[in-house]
Image (spheres, grey):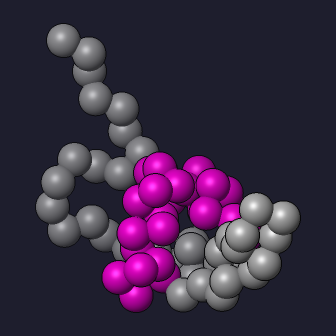
Amino acid sequence: MTPRQAAKVIGCTATNVRTLINRGRLSAVQVPCAYGFTWDLDPKDVTRYARKPQGRGYPRGRKRKAD
């Protein structure tokens, strides 16, 4: 699973998924590709993180109202 696919499951951006990988909250393996490398995430780990209750901040996956 790529960071972009994981972001859709979690309800955030791919950049946030990469940050979670770098902080050790999601496990991933680097896979070489044509432009450098990409991350390969475990789908079970991603769904576990998505089900985990959020402690604070704006709810995951909900869009904010435009003012």
Relative vertical location of residue 16 with respect to residue 27 in this rendering, above or below: above
x and y percentages locating residue 46 in the rendered image: 56, 74
Relative vertical location of residue 57 with respect to residue 45 in this rendering, above or below: above
Question: Is residue 25 or residue 52 the one in the foreground?
Answer: 25
**Does 20 appear in magenta?**
yes
Q: Which residue, as the protein is rendered here, is positioned at the far front?
A: 35
Viewport quadrant of the C terminus: top left
x and y percentages locating residue 26 in the rendered image: 48, 82
Q: Is there any visible trace of residue 43 in the rendered image?
A: no
Type of secondary structure dominating the magenta stretch: helix
Q: Which residue, as the protein is rendered here, is positioned at the far top?
A: 67
- To which quarter of the image does residue 64 belong? top left
x and y percentages locating residue 31 in the rendered image: 75, 81
Q: Residue at x 36, y 51 (%)?
A: 60
Question: Is residue 64 or residue 15 the one in the foreground?
Answer: 15
Horizontal side of 38 relative to 62 (left or right) equals right
**Does 29 appear in magenta?**
no
Q: How many marks?
A: 0
Q: Is there any visible trace of residue 33 in the rendered image?
A: yes
Viewport quadrant of the N terminus: bottom right
Relative vertical location of residue 12 with respect to residue 65 in this rendering, above or below: below
Horizontal side of 44 relative to 56 (left or right) equals right
Question: Is residue 18 or residue 37 the one in the foreground?
Answer: 37
Q: Residue at x 81, y 70 (%)?
A: 33
- To which quarter of the image does residue 42 belong? bottom right
Q: Residue at x 67, y 83 (%)?
A: 30
The magenta span reads 1-26
Q: Residue at x 41, y 59 (%)?
A: 16
x and y percentages locating residue 35 in the rendered image: 76, 62
